[in-house]
């Protein structure tokens, strides 16, 4: 890509200061940076498409997880683009390579728009998942209430001490009955254990729902900030590679004339 100076192929040696790198070595060092950039960017796209397989579109949990996976890998793309466009002012670029850089410049803009579009998708999925958590909590509490009412009716209609004792043991296996309580006493104990069990289940359900919502909030906040910063970073790459598009435009005009 750059012409190497014949007089600069080998380093000069100073026995006191060490080795002085030649101009050619410097050029090859910058070329290595750019080659690594192409490899890194290629690896990013391989990983990018791999995480989409198998697809589960319209699944809010899957989409939010995929968005976070994409954000985990965005630094690879930013690093790759940064290395690819790492040129010095006195560098000579071949026309074919300039055309490749031109397409990569526009690719950075496409990716920037894509990551910005992930922002509303993140919010949509987060609200949908929150609604599911809320409905699950409501349904679980309502189901526990219905089951509690059914058991309470069975307790009221039961006239057998053996059945009432079995009810109590099914509700709280660790409950130890002392003496020989009567049927009415067994009914009251069963009702108390039923209320205690329902309360514990309700509190567990609420705490589990709160934990899920907290995790969702953390994940959503990370995804929202990540999509915006990723889109901004890729947009800056596109903006700062304007020189490629300008050179291509000038080259096209020269070809016409």
Image: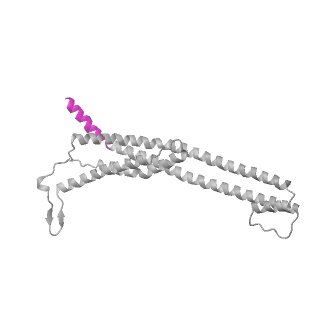
Q: Position of residue 240 (x, y in %)?
A: 33, 44
Q: What main secondary structure does the magenta stretch of the protein show?
A: helix
Residue 194 place in picture, x, y as percent: 77, 58
Which residue ends up furthest to the top in the rendered image?
257
Residue sitting at 54 percent across and 47 percent down? 61
What quarter of the picture does the C terminus occupy? Answer: top left
- Left or right: residue 127 versus residue 74 is right
Stretch in magenta: 241-257
The residue sitting at 27% across, 51% down in the picture is 35
Q: Nearer the viewer, residue 63 or 248?
A: 63
Residue for point 35% across, 50% down: 43
- What x and y, as percent, mark residue 91? 21, 47
Q: Residue at x 82, y 53 (%)?
A: 154
Comparing 249 with 40, the one in front is: 40
Which one is nearer the viewer's eye here, 206 or 15? Answer: 206
Residue 82 relative to residue 221: left or right: left
């Amino acid at each position: 890509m750059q012409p190497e100076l014949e007089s600069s192929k080998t380093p000069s040696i100073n026995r006191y200061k060490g080795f002085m790198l030649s101009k050619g070595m410097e050029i090859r060092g910058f070329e290595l940076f750019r080659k690594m950039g192409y490899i890194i960017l290629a690896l990013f796209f391989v990983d990018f498409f791999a995480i989409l397989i198998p697809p589960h579109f319209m699944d809010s949990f899957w989409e939010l997880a995929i968005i976070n996976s994409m954000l985990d890998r965005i630094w690879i793309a930013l690093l790759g683009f940064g290395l690819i466009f790492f040129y010095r002012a006195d560098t000579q670029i071949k026309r074919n390579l300039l055309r490749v850089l031109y397409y990569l410049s526009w690719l950075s803009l496409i990716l920037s728009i894509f990551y910005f579009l992930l922002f509303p998708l993140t919010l949509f999925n987060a609200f949908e998942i929150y609604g599911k958590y809320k409905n699950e909590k409501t349904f679980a509490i309502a189901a526990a209430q219905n089951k509690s009412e059914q058991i309470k009716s069975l307790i009221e209609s039961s006239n057998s001490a053996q059945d009432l004792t079995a009810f109590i043991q099914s509700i709280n296996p660790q409950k130890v009955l002392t003496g020989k309580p009567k049927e009415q006493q067994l009914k009251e104990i069963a009702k108390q254990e039923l209320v205690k069990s329902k309360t514990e289940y309700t509190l567990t359900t609420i705490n589990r729902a709160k934990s899920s919502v907290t995790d969702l909030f953390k994940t959503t906040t990370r995804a929202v900030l990540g999509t915006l910063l990723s889109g901004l970073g890729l947009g800056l790459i596109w903006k700062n590679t304007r020189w490629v598009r300008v050179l291509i435009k000038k080259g096209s005009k020269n070809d016409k004339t």
